Amino acid sequence: RESTMPGENVKERRQFERVGKTCPVWFFGEHESEVKARTLNIGEGGLLCRIQEDEVPWHVGDFVHMRLNVPRETPNTYYLESVETDGRVIRFEIPNDNDGHLMALAFHPRLDLGEL
């Protein structure tokens, strides 16, 4: 029997590749005010972000509307493309540095982000 390392099957669960790009993201809930965060990684299936708020106004399973500024570049240009979409909260984590909260979301529907 082969041994498995912790987290070894995470890649199998994840359907879409994630890229370690950071970009600003703003969340809008039904009754909450805007919450700003920063992505740690992003892919067509979802994102992981760091929120500095003391209390995050959502729970796992909640749907939230968001606006992302996705970095785009060509050999001669760099710009941020504004993208609006909805997502479902998948999980929360407290990072090892205890700096805010980490929140993972799945895009609904899946986003076609093209080349990141």
Image (tube, rainbow, N blue to C red):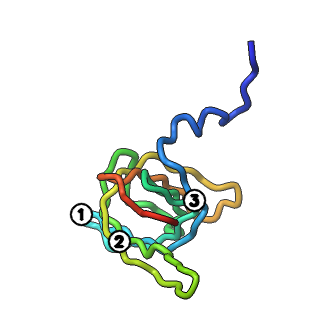
Comes first in the chain, label 3 or label 1? 3
Sooner in the amino-acid sequence: mark 1 or mark 2:
1
Identity of the amino acid at label 3?
Answer: Val
Spot occupied by residue 20 in the image (x, y as percentages of width and height): 61, 62
Residue 98: x and y in percent read: 66, 60
Q: In the rendered image, which residue does mark 2 sit on?
A: 83
Dot 2 amino acid type: Val
Q: Nearer the viewer, mark 1 or mark 2?
A: 2
Task: Choose the circle earlier in sequence order: 3 or 2.
Answer: 3
Alpha-carbon span between mark 3 and mark 1? 29 Å
* Residue at point 49%, 76% (across, down): 72
Amino acid at the residue labelled 1: Glu
Mark 2 residue crowding within 10 angstroms, few (<14) / some (14–19) / many (20+): few
Instruction: Look at the numbered disc 1 and give the secondary structure of its residue.
Output: loop
- Asked if 101 appears above or below 23 in the picture, the reply is above
Where 87 sits versus 25, above or below?
A: above
Which residue lies under the disc numbered 3? 19
Number of numbered callouts drawn: 3
Find disc 1 in the rendering and name its residue: 30
The mark found on residue 41 in the picture is none
The reply to whether discs 3 and 1 touch (Cβ–Cβ < 8 Å) is no
Quadrant in the picture for the N terminus: top right
Q: Identify the residue at image location x=56%, y=87%.
A: 76
